[in-house]
Image (tube, rainbow, N blue to C red):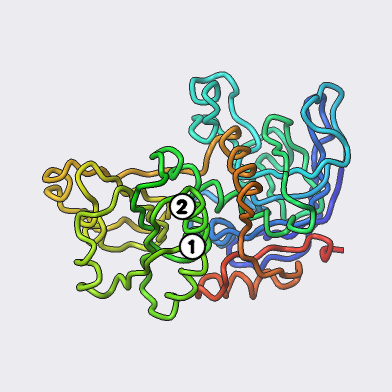
Amino acid sequence: MTILAIGTAASDQPLDRMEITRRDTGPHDVRIDIAFCGICHSDIHTARGEWPGTMYPCVPGHEIVGRVAEVGAHVTSHKVGDLVGVGCIVDSCQHCEECADGAENYCDNMVGTYNAPTDDRPGHTLGSYAKGVVVHERYVLKITHPEEQLAAVAPLLCAGITTYSPLRHWKVGPGMKVGVVGIGGLGHMGLKLAHAMGAHVVAFTTSDSKREAAKALGADEVVLSRNADELAAHAKSFDFILNTVAAPHDLDAFLTLLKRDGTMTLVGAPASPHPSPNVFNFIMKRRSLAGSMIGGIPETQEMLDFCTNHGIVSDIEMIRADEIEPAYDRMVKGDVKYRFVMDIATLG
C-alpha cells in the first residue's frame, strides 16, 4: 500500500512530502488511519543525523493517534472504528523475560516505530508523519479520552509514558516530596502526573518567567535552579527527583537535594555526557542515580487510562504538515509550550 508521508532523504535535506509503502495487513495486524502525530525532539535528532545510525529515507513520528481502518483475521483486541494509539514500539521478540513482564521497551530486539531494522520496505521502519500505519495488535493501545481531546493525547504516547513510568516505578504518591527538573515537553507532563499522584511537587527551572506556568501545571513550589540560596533551602529533602533535561548539566546540584535513600532518575538524553557526579554525594546518604526509557505496552495503557481518569492531556500547539521545518527550528530554540502536534489531514 502506497501512502503520503513527510520525510527526508538525507540529513542535510529538509523534510517534505514523499510516498512510502506500508505492508499489507497481516493476520495479527491493525491498519490505522492516522489523525494526529506528535513531534518529539528525538525526531529532530534522527532526521537531521544528530544521533548516529540514521537510515534514509527517514520518516519520523512515534506519537500516533487515529482510527482503526482494518484488522487482520486473528485480531481480537481492536475493531474497525476504534480510537487507538501507537507509541515508540511496533515490535519486539515477544518471548524474552522483558517481553513476558510487559517491559517490551527493554527487549534487546525491540523495534522502534522509526529507524529500526525490519523486513518491511525499505528495510527499516518508517514513522508516522504519514497518512497511515500497519502495526501488530500487541503494540496498539486503546484511547479512552474523549475524541475531542485526541490531538492532545498524541504526546502521551512518548512524553507521557516517559515521565509516568519512573514515577510509577519509584512509587511516587501522597506524602512524598518530588522534584521535576525542566519545564518542557517532558517536564510539563512530569508536573501534571506527579501532582495527580498526590505528591508535593517542586519544579526546577532556569527561567524565572516560568514560575507561574509551572504552578499552573501542578507544581506546589518552584525553584530557580540558578539560585544557590533557593537550592540550599531544599537540601536533603526530596524522596525522588525526575530530571527531564536533555542537555549536559551539573547533576550534583540536584543529588544533594535528595534525602537518605532518595533517587534521581534521568529521562533526558543529552548528545554529550553529563559531568561526572561526586561519588561522595551517593555514599554519604545512600542516594541513587537511575535512568528510565519510555515504558512497556501494559504500562503505557495504564498511563493512558490514568490520564483519562485525571483529565490529563499534553499542552499542544497544532501545526500543518508544511510547517514541520519551522516547527523543528522552534523546538531547537525551546519555543513551544509544550509539544507540537501535526494535523495529518493537512498532508493532502
Q: Residue 199: x percent and y percent?
A: 41, 51
Asked whether disc 1 touches disc 2, contact meaning CB atoms under 8 Å apart, the reply is: yes
Which residue lies at the image location 79% right of the left edge and 60% below the top edge? 344
The quadrant in which the C terminus is found is bottom right
Mark 2 secondary-structure assignment: helix
> Would you identify the image quadrant in which residue 246 lies?
bottom left
Residue at point 74% right, 60% down?
6
**Amino acid at dot 2:** Ala
- Distance from the alpha carbon under mark 1 to that under mark 2: 8 Å
Q: Nearer the viewer, residue 12 or 178?
A: 178
Q: Which residue is mark 1?
A: 218
Relative to 111, is 174 on the left or the right? left
Q: Identify the mark at residue 239; answer none if there is no mark.
A: none
* Type of amino acid at the residue the image marks with label 1: Gly
**Residue 296, percent across and down?**
55, 35
Residue drawn at the location 47% of the way across and 43% of the way down: 293
Q: Earlier in the sequence, mark 1 or mark 2?
A: 2
Which residue is at the front of the view, 23 or 240? 240
* Nearest the eye: 228 or 273: 228
- Badge 2: few (under 14), some or many (20 or more) residues near its Cα, within 10 Å? many
- Marks counted in the figure total 2
Image quadrant where one finds the N terminus: top right
Furthest toward the front, the residue is: 175
For disc 2, the marked residue is: 194
Q: Position of residue 239 (x, y in %)?
A: 30, 48
Taking the image as shown, residue 183 lies to the left or right of residue 100, namely: left
Q: In terms of secondary structure, where does tag 1 sit? A: loop
Quarter of the image for residue 253 reads bottom left
* Furthest-bottom residue in this view: 209
Q: Eyeballing the image, is 132 above or below 23? A: below
Please state the horizontal and vertical placement of residue 343, each as a whole percent of the image: 77, 63
